Image (spheres, rainbow, N blue to C red):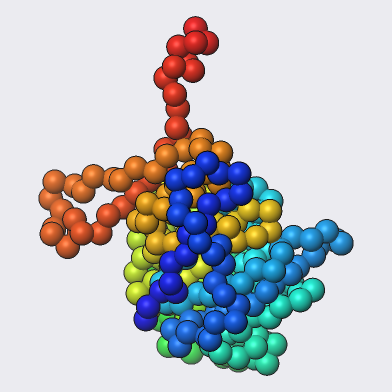
């Protein structure tokens, strides 16, 4: 399935470097058949304070990373897409239907959710936690089948937590717990994954393992993540830029205009550079450019401080 059309806009106050254009998809544009989630003119307030302002965006098969400064509304948008916060105005559509017309069980089968500060009872074992991902399919009192157990095994293997599946959550480090909770989301086998900071507490090798996993899933799933680590976010297919409750830009991860808008969004304190392909890269690998974000340190500033 195709990705929504790229649209880049420089954040307000940026000094050029990005082509001008609409910051958001047209909310009146017909629903793309490839789109799994469509947000139309979302406005959300929390504790009386506005958090999202007239946000319209759509997500199809592939991996989209939502990025922006602290307080930009990234997590609130993700929660709104999952139907977890009330909307002051606007609507969310899942597979062409208003989200509210799906039953809770249907929605649970279609959308898997990982919270930024996910909670699970500490006395449950890792395997018990991952089994919770099968609840939308079996119900609260339904028996877990052999097929379910195989799905649980696959999810734990994908998240590299099989070795300690019988340990309790209370015995795990933050990174180990995060991998168990991610496995729970995978065990749902939902076509849409909404993941808020899935790499939290993970060391670099496991962060990259999650990146590789999301790349594989993005071939057949709609994956939407909130990420603070911009180098990890640049491994996604598409980035959505947010600031002060609004979408201020979006585009493919390798679009130079997106790179300029991303740098401007963070006060030009970073630059986006291409990662050289390894010497043993295949021709196919060499055509898939990858990028990373680096602090834009001026050596002259350091020299003047001496």
Where residue 116 appears, x then y in whole percent? Answer: 62, 58
Can you tell which quarter of the image residue 252 is in? bottom left
User: In percent of the image, x 37 and y 78: which residue is there?
Assistant: 2
User: In percent of the image, x 19 and y 56: which residue is there?
Assistant: 286
Query: Which sits in the foreground, 15 or 47?
Result: 15
Seen from this angle, which residue lies furthest top? 306
Where residue 170 appears, x then y in whole percent? Answer: 62, 56
Can you tell which quarter of the image residue 90 is in? bottom right
User: In percent of the image, x 52 and y 10: which residue is there?
Assistant: 305
Where residue 159 appears, x then y in whole percent? Answer: 42, 63
Q: Please, is residue 201 above or below residue 42 in the view? A: above
* Residue 122 is at least partly visible in this image: no
User: In percent of the image, x 34 and y 69: which residue is there?
Assistant: 216
Q: Please, is residue 67 above or below residue 181 in the view? A: above
* Residue 297 is at least partly visible in this image: yes
Query: Which sits in the foreground, 231 or 189?
Result: 231
Query: Which sits in the foreground, 162 or 25?
Result: 25
Say which quadrant the N terminus sits in.
Answer: bottom left
Query: Which sits in the foreground, 256 or 65?
Result: 256
Q: Please, is residue 122 above or below residue 3 in the view? A: above
Can you tell which quarter of the image residue 75 is in? bottom right
Where residue 130 appears, x then y in whole percent? Answer: 53, 72
Report the side of 23 relative to 91 (left or right).
left
């Amino acid at each position: 399935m195709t990705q929504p059309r790229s649209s880049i806009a420089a954040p307000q106050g940026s000094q050029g470097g990005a082509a001008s254009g609409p910051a958001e998809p047209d909310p009146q544009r017909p629903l793309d058949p490839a789109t799994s989630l469509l947000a139309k003119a979302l406005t959300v307030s929390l504790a009386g304070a506005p958090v999202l302002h007239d946000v319209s965006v759509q997500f199809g098969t592939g991996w989209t990373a939502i990025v922006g400064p602290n307080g930009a509304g990234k997590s609130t948008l993700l929660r709104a897409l999952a139907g977890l916060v009330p909307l002051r105005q606007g609507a969310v559509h899942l597979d062409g239907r208003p989200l509210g017309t799906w039953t809770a069980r249907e929605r649970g089968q279609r959308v898997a959710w990982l919270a930024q500060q996910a909670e699970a009872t500490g006395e449950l074992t890792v395997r018990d936690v991952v089994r919770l991902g099968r609840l939308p399919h079996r119900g609260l009192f339904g028996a877990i089948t052999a097929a379910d157990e195989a799905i649980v095994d696959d999810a734990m293997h994908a998240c590299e937590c099989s070795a300690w599946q019988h340990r309790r959550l209370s015995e795990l480090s933050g990174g180990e717990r995060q991998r168990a909770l991610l496995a729970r989301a995978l065990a749902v086998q939902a076509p849409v994954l909404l993941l808020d900071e899935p790499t939290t507490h993970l060391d670099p090798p496991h962060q990259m393992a999650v990146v590789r996993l999301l790349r594989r899933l993005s071939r057949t799933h709609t994956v939407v993540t909130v990420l603070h680590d911009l180098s990890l976010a640049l491994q996604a297919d598409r980035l959505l830029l947010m600031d002060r409750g609004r979408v201020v830009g979006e585009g493919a991860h390798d679009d130079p205009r997106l790179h300029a808008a991303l740098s401007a969004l963070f006060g030009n304190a970073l630059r986006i550079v291409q990662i050289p392909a390894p010497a043993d890269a295949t021709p196919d690998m060499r055509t898939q450019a990858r990028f990373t974000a680096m602090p834009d340190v001026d050596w002259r500033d350091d020299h003047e401080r001496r």
